[in-house]
Amino acid sequence: MPELPEVETIVNDLKKEIIGRSFIDLWTDAENIIKGNSVNDFTKKIINKRIIDIKRRGKNILIYLDQSIILLVHQKISGHLLLAKWSFENDKWIAPVGPLSDDSMNGYLHVVMGLDDGRQLALSDVRKFAKMEILKDDKLDIGPEPLEIDYESFRDLFRKKRGKIKQLLMKQEFIAGIGNIYASEILFISKIHPEEDVSKLEEQDFKNIFQGMQFILKESIRSRGDSFSDFRTIHGEKGGFQNIMKVYQKNGKPCLNCGMKIERMNLGGRGTFYCPNCQKKK
């Protein structure tokens, strides 16, 4: 699933490309992706509206249009937005030569929104779990942003909390934007066991987690996100963070710190990766 760095990469790229443009039409073969309105009503609300701004909130993309229209895109598990000029032939979208046509992950187009400059903003999603909807406002019921919060506010989130640290970091209502990949990487660099109960963590542990969180997320943004699985940039290219990950999907490989083999366990239904030597439970 695209997490904070992947969504931030998409938002930053889109802001350079489509601010000031307008949607002129919409095509879809998966009406279930459009939430809250029929496809016709949804289309009427967004066409001929100028794109004023684009922001990220947690894992959500918010596209601000004229007349106080806010279009939310949540890419869910396998969705990603693409920007290009496709042609439509024999009931199929034909991608231009390059990453969009070379990488099959970019070929699952289920929503295509035409822009007034001849290009299209499209959603590719192999599993069709992504969603788009029109919001009344941008007040989402999720936690604070991990790259905007200061340490004292971050520390306060954990007061009187119980539970396993990795599961808390992944709760979007607790702190927004962190998922399975980055929770594993953050806890590795912080030397905290994923199953550690937050009530047993000491002040230095919280400082390590905060600093590790800031470092890992910023490093991934610099690397243009993680493409271990489905994520691609708006131009159909892979990000680079998967090339420098330390533990995620590294089970059986030696820890880069101590040489012991990375292990995998299930925690809350998710595969969790850690070093049993560097990340010992208290």
Image (cartoon, helix red, strand yellow):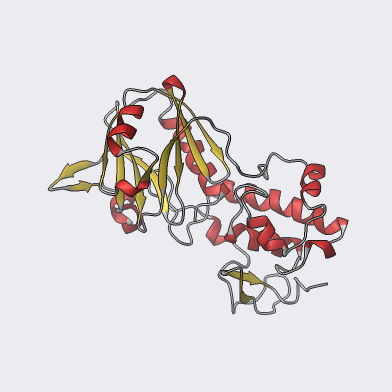
Residue that protrudes farthest toward the right in the picture: 203
Place of residue 107 in the rendered image (x, y in percent of width and height, measured from the top left)? 29, 53
Q: Which residue is drawn at 41% across and 50% down?
A: 130
Along the horizontal axis of the image, is 51 left or right of 243? Answer: left
Q: Which residue is drawn at 49% across and 52% down?
A: 239
- Image quarter where the C terminus lies is bottom right
Q: In this view, does 172 lie above or below 10?
A: below
Q: Residue at x 46, y 52 (%)?
A: 76
Place of residue 125 in the rendered image (x, y in percent of width and height, measured from the top left)? 36, 53
Q: Which of the 4 quarters of the picture holds residue 96?
A: top left
Along the viewing direction, whichever of 145 and 248 lies nearer the viewer: 145
Place of residue 55 in the rendered image (x, y in percent of width and height, measured from the top left)? 53, 34
Q: Which of the 4 quarters of the picture holds residue 17?
A: top left
Q: Which of the 4 quarters of the picture holds residue 265?
A: bottom right
**Can the viewer see residue 191 in this picture?**
yes
Along the horizontal axis of the image, is 242 left or right of 142? Answer: left
| Label tally | 0
Q: Residue at x 72, y 62 (%)?
A: 165
